[in-house]
Amino acid sequence: MHLKRLEIHGFKSFADRITLSFQKGITAIVGPNGSGKSNIADSLCWVMGEHNLRNIRGAKLEDIIFSGSEERKPLGMADVTLVLDNSDQTLPLDYSEVAVTRRVYRSGESEFLINRSPVRLKDIQELFFDTGLGREAYSVISQGKIDSILSLRPEERRSVFEEAAGIMRYKAKKNLTMKKLAETENNILRIQDLLQELVTQLEPLSEQAQKAERYLKLQDQLKQLEINYSYTELTGINQTLKELIEQQNLKNNELLRLKEEEENLSQRVISIKSRVNTVEEELEVRQKQLMEETAQRERAMGELNLFGERKRSLQTRILELEAFIAQQAEKAMDLEKKKENLSQLTTNIDEKKTRLASEVKQLEEVLLVKEVKIKEFRAELIAKKQCFTNKLEQSSLLKQKISEASVQKDFRHEKETEVHEELEEIAKELAVTDQRIYKAKDKLNALRQQLDVVKNQEEKLAAELKKRQSYLLNQVEKNQEMRERLRGLESKLTLLTDMERGHQGYFQGVKSLLEIQKEPFRREIHGVVADLIRAESGYELALEVAMGSSLQYLVINHHRDARQAIDYLKKHALGRATFLPLNLIDEKPDRLLGIKSLLMEYNSKPATDAVLYEQRYSAIVQHLLNGTIIAPNLKTAVEIAEKTGKKFRVVTLEGELIAPGGAITGGNLERRRAGLLSRKGEITQLKREKEDLLAFMNRGLAEEKKLEEEIREISQLHEEKKNLQQETNFNINSVLKDMDALVVSHQKTLTKKEQLQQVLLRIEEELSLQKSAVDNLRDKLKQVEAERDD
């Protein structure tokens, strides 16, 4: 099985989809700090089933989804696909290539896919069982994992080897089966309890069941009756509802019709009112015109009637005269016979006729003149009427123009007022905008000052945090070193304690006697000499050489007990042992009493002074070490031997021995550390070192905890300051945007003000021109009315 490639999208720092192809020969991925190397390892652990976010350096689900940056928006999902070459069928799937995909959404939903088929997280975890892969497998070892594996207890370390041995799948199945069996047993016990309880409740429940059956039957009957009753009522209600709905539909139709008629009537009323207003206006104008024309016509008709009467009178007179002429002509014809008689009368009549003809002619001339005058008057009347009509039209047009000019003037006055009001509003708005800009500038300055303070605080906190982290790193390293030292010390102490407890290095007979418990003489044994004395620090090796095998001598209360022990050794063939019965060993005088001043000159001392023991064992110590001297080195030991006449045994701190008589033993001492006193001293020293190291490590851990708490507090403050800095930057940007908007609004308002001022100037010019035009129109109207009146 071979890792072919890894596809990452939206996971932690990988905003864009990337594909990492692992060809043969790739052994490492390198890069600077913060480039995402650890994120690749985290993505591998995550896609292989890791569900503890802390193991991939996260606290919550959103931490593993790309959270955005200054230039990129945050993503809504993260997915990782792991592609493995399964041509060797390591994974139990019939595919030569296996693609495992894990996807998570910011809403909390998760998806798991194997070769694009949806599966469960459990299926992915089971797939990687016994393959070395998985969320806690040994194939992915993160930072500090090796130390943690080495520091695990054996039973905890066992799981790593079980995973490598390929039994984790079966162990997991076994644990699951055992868990299910335990749950099944608990369920069986629970079912038995429930069954017993149900048996006791069976009889009363049977009675209750009968009552319940009767109740259900009655309830069914009641339900049926209620249904029938409800159906009957519902039928009536439906019928009533149907009638009401039909009535409502009719009323609605009638209401719609009435509304349409109302709208039509309203439109007609509006139209009629408009027409009435128009007609009334026209009627008023026409009435005025009619009245004026009627007056003119009446004057003209009066004159015309007068001329007509005069014409009719003249025509009547002419007719009368013609009739009279005809009558006279007839009379003349009748009287022609009487011409002669009436010549005078004829002459008079002719004269009269001539005079009358002359009068008629004059009258005809006058009538002709009058007719001409009448025609001229009629033409003049028509011209005057046309002129009057024109003047009326001019007057009406001028009045209309004056009215329109007045309306336009009023409109321009209103527009001027509106412009003035709008200019006042703009002035207020400009004042408010200036005030807001001033406040925004003050706020911006305050925010910038706050940003400088926050930046300074953030930089100080960052420096302090870095310093504390450096301290913490050093302290962690020290604590780790102390842990390693403590671990090594405890291991060594355990080893020596086990050796001491197991009596390793003791003779077979001695070891056998110390391990038995039931024999009566065992209670009389105080122990070996090495257990009953303690060497001063630094003198262990010298005392071991001086005492030799006597360190394994058994101190016993009485010689009878010694005989029983010897018989026991013989009987069981367990070897030999040397006994020091307290009742037989007597304390002897100190042989070195006379040379102690000499020993002090050579910085030496009696061996008995280098041993700590209880007073009751003083005879034993004197018996074993009386006459033995401890010197600091071999040269000093030789000088002491020469000074004392070679009568005493002298040993050095390095293990050389000068026997009485002058024999010297020295060289490399094998198994130096196996000495009983050295081992005891080393155990004591290790225990003391352990206590000191524990105290020192506790102080170091307390310091580490203190530093972690300080770092947590400083980090929290630093994060708060960073957030405050971001918030302040956001507020500054917001204020700048508001200021830009206010400046733009201020500029627009100023532009609008200038435009309105231009409009106001134009309106004033138009009003001035309009006033001049109205004055001209009124002058023309006066002139036209004067001409019309004339």
Image (tube, rainbow, N blue to C red):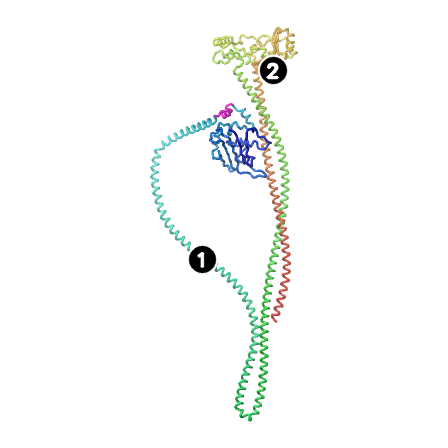
Residue visible at 57% across and 83% down? Answer: 360
Residue 708's label in the rendered image is none
Give the left or right position of residue 191, taking residue 625 as reference.
left
Given residues 498 and 535, the one toward you in this image is 498
- Relative to 307, residue 557 above or below: above
Residue 179, percent from left and from top: 44, 28
> Hey, what amino acid is under mark 2?
Gly
Q: Residues within 10 Å of mark 1 (few under 14, many from 20)?
A: few
Q: Nearer the viewer, residue 654 or 156?
A: 156
Neighbourhood count class around disc 2 (C-alpha, 10 Å): few under 14, some 14–19, many 20 upward:
few
Q: Quadrant of the C terminus?
A: bottom right
Kindly identify the residue that appears in the image at 60 percent across and 63 percent down.
401
Is residue 534 highlighted in magenta?
no
Q: Work out whether residue 455 or residue 11 is closer to the camera in this orientation and state it.
A: 11
User: Which residue is under mark 2?
Assistant: 538
- Labelled pair 2, 1 in contact (Cβ < 8 Å): no
> Where residue 288 sits in the image (x, y, percent)?
56, 68
* Lower sequence index among marks 2 and 1: 1
Vertical relation: 55 (above or below) 575: below
Residue 257: which numbered mark, if any?
Answer: 1
Q: Which residues are magenta?
A: 154-166
Residue 342 falls in which quadrant of the image?
bottom right
Question: In the image as oriented, which residue stretches furthest toward the bottom?
Answer: 341
Q: Nearer the viewer, residue 570 or 308?
A: 308
Of the residues shown, which amino acid type is indicated by label 1? Arg
CA distance separating discs 2 and 1: 126 Å
Residue 213 locus on image (x, y percent): 34, 38
Compared with residue 749, is residue 2 higher up or lower down, i.e. above or below? above
Judged by its main secondary structure, the magenta piece is: helix
Q: Mark 2 falls on what kind of element?
A: loop
